Image (cartoon, grey):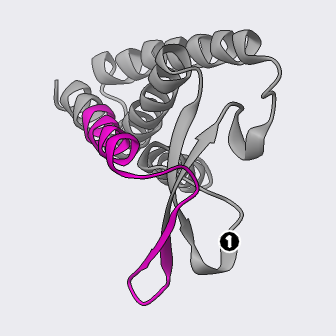
Amino acid sequence: MFYIILIMVLLLSDQWIKNRIEQRRKLHQKEEILRGNIIITKYYNKGAFLGLLKDKQKLLERINVIAIGVMIVYLIKLILGKGSTLSKLSLSLIIGGALSNVYDRIQRKYVIDYFSFKGLKKVVFNMGDMFIFLGSIMLLFYKNK
């Protein structure tokens, strides 16, 4: 049950931030925070990471829904089979972030990205992306033990 709650908290927190960004920021308006190390910018991404498949949105939606479905089934298998805590946690992070982005893709027809890092100004992320990244790194380290 903990992992389902975690997924929902990640999904809802990212959606809450995206809604605030959508309501309060102008598209492409930049604001530097933390001494310029993080740049807040509202950006609409119609594709996957770095805009991939932006002209094939229905295909991208299907791929995302299928991938999330497979991960949910696998997470349930791990929960029922007493899988490792690290693998369940990493999958929960990935699923929570992916659900937030897929929700955007289906409801808005684009994903709201809203921050970048000082050295990567042209790449804009959202918290869902960070959850996916962190979960993937954790899963890689778990698998390479």
Residue 49 left/right relative to 38: right
Q: Residue at x 70, y 42 (%)?
A: 49
Q: Residue at x 53, y 47 (%)?
A: 113
- For the N terminus, give its image quadrant: top left
Indicate the position of residue 139 as horizontal and vertical percent values: 53, 46
Task: Choose top left, top right, bottom left or bottom right for residue 77.
Answer: top left
Q: Which of 90 and 55 is in front in this view?
A: 55
Instruction: Identify the residue under disc 1.
Output: 120
Crowding at mark 1 (Cα within 10 Å: few <14, some 14-19, many 20+): few
Amino acid type of the residue that numbered disc 1 sits on in the rendered structure: Leu
Would you place residue 54 above or below residue 25 in this image? above
Asked which secondary structure carries label 1, the reply is helix
Q: Give the range drawn in magenta.
A: 10-39
Indicate the position of residue 134 as horizontal and vertical percent values: 48, 54
Q: Nearer the viewer, residue 57 or 44?
A: 44
**Within the magenta stretch, is there residue 128?**
no
- For the C terminus, give its image quadrant: bottom right
